């Protein structure tokens, strides 16, 4: 038996958060969101397929499937720079691979978020927003000091948070679907719907869902 738990955690995004949201409200424009999606075996990820299907028709969202665009790992850095400049919120959607991200996304980060563009003398992304949207194979309880992975996910994701800080971007609480292979279809659908709603209104704090977790209510056993 599965028990859905969702939690809202308040985060401070800095003074720029209120400034940008105020400007967008007055202009009646939805923030432009760039979703950088990376999964080397997308056909095997039901959770991510459901999420992508939910968001692909949103007018304010540009979706970039890195493994479809760059199967040879040769990234068009200039094109990626231009897209980053044109959007307000940058979303990195990917499964958790070896406590990090798939290799092509790491290559993208290393090549695209380079010194002289994203950090250093010029910080072209300053004031924009970074949100990681993660699926994991493990349950939330596995990501703790007493769990299998020894550390909570927020600590495991610190390299991404530090990258955002280096680029002077605002870090937003990650959206996480734990145990993504084992949760039920309804759980995945609800998570995807929350994701879609947030993308439509990314600065609505009521939609800043920090996680949607699936746990066994009966005995808490792992996978």
Image (tube, rainbow, N blue to C red):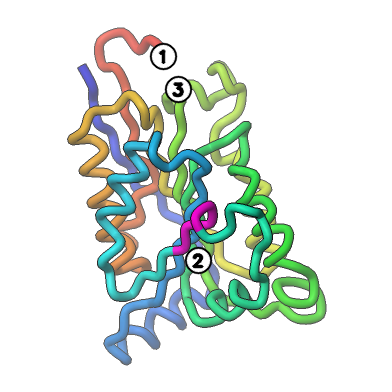
In the displayed structure image, the side of residue 154 where residue 65 appears, left or right: left
Mark 2 Cα-neighbour bin, 10 Å: few <14, some 14–19, many ≥20: many
Question: Residue at 26% of width from left, 66% of height from top?
Answer: 57
Mark 1 Cα-neighbour bin, 10 Å: few <14, some 14–19, many ≥20: few
Q: Which mark is residue 223?
A: 1
Q: Which mark is residue 90?
A: 2
What range of the chain is rendered magenta? 64-68
Pick whichever, 79 or 86, lies toward us: 79
Q: Earlier in the sequence, mark 3 or mark 1?
A: 3
Question: Residue at 58% of width from left, 58% of height from top?
Answer: 70
Element at badge 3? helix
Spatial CA distance of label 2 from label 3 is 28 Å
Classified by dominant secondary structure, the portion drawn in magenta counts as helix
Q: Earlier in the sequence, mark 1 or mark 2?
A: 2
Q: Does the CB distance between marks 1 and 2 fall below 8 Å?
A: no
Q: Does the CB distance between marks 2 and 3 fall below 8 Å?
A: no
Element at badge 1? loop
- What residue is disc 3 on? 141
Residue 62 drawn above or below residue 135 = below
Q: Earlier in the sequence, mark 2 or mark 3?
A: 2
Q: Is residue 67 magenta?
A: yes
Q: Is residue 123 visible?
A: yes
Please state the horizontal and vertical placement of residue 179, each as a whole percent of the image: 39, 27
Q: Quadrant location of residue 208? A: bottom left
Farthest residue to the front: give it.
72
Question: Residue at 35% of width from left, 12% of height from top?
Answer: 220
In the displayed structure image, the side of residue 223 where residue 168 appears, left or right: right
């Amino acid at each position: 038996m599965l028990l859905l738990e969702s939690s809202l955690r308040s985060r401070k995004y800095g003074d720029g958060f209120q400034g940008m949201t105020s400007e967008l409200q007055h202009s009646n424009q939805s923030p432009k969101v760039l979703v950088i999606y990376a999964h080397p075996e997308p056909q095997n990820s039901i959770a991510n397929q459901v999420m992508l299907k939910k968001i692909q028709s949103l007018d304010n969202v540009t979706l970039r499937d890195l493994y479809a665009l760059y199967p040879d790992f040769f990234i068009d850095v200039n094109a990626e720079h231009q897209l980053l400049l044109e959007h307000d919120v940058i979303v990195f959607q990917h499964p958790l691979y070896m406590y990090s991200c798939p290799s092509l996304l790491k290559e993208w980060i290393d090549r695209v978020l380079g010194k002289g563009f994203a950090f250093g003398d010029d910080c072209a992304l300053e004031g924009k927003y970074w949100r990681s949207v993660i699926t994991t194979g493990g349950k939330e309880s596995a990501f703790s000091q007493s769990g299998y992975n020894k550390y909570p996910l927020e600590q495991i994701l610190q390299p991404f948070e530090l990258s955002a800080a280096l680029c002077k971007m605002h870090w937003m609480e990650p959206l996480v679907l734990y145990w993504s292979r084992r949760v039920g279809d309804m759980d995945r659908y609800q998570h995807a719907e929350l994701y879609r709603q947030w993308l439509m209104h990314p600065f609505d704090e009521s939609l800043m869902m920090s996680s949607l977790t699936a746990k066994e209510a009966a005995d808490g056993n792992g996978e």
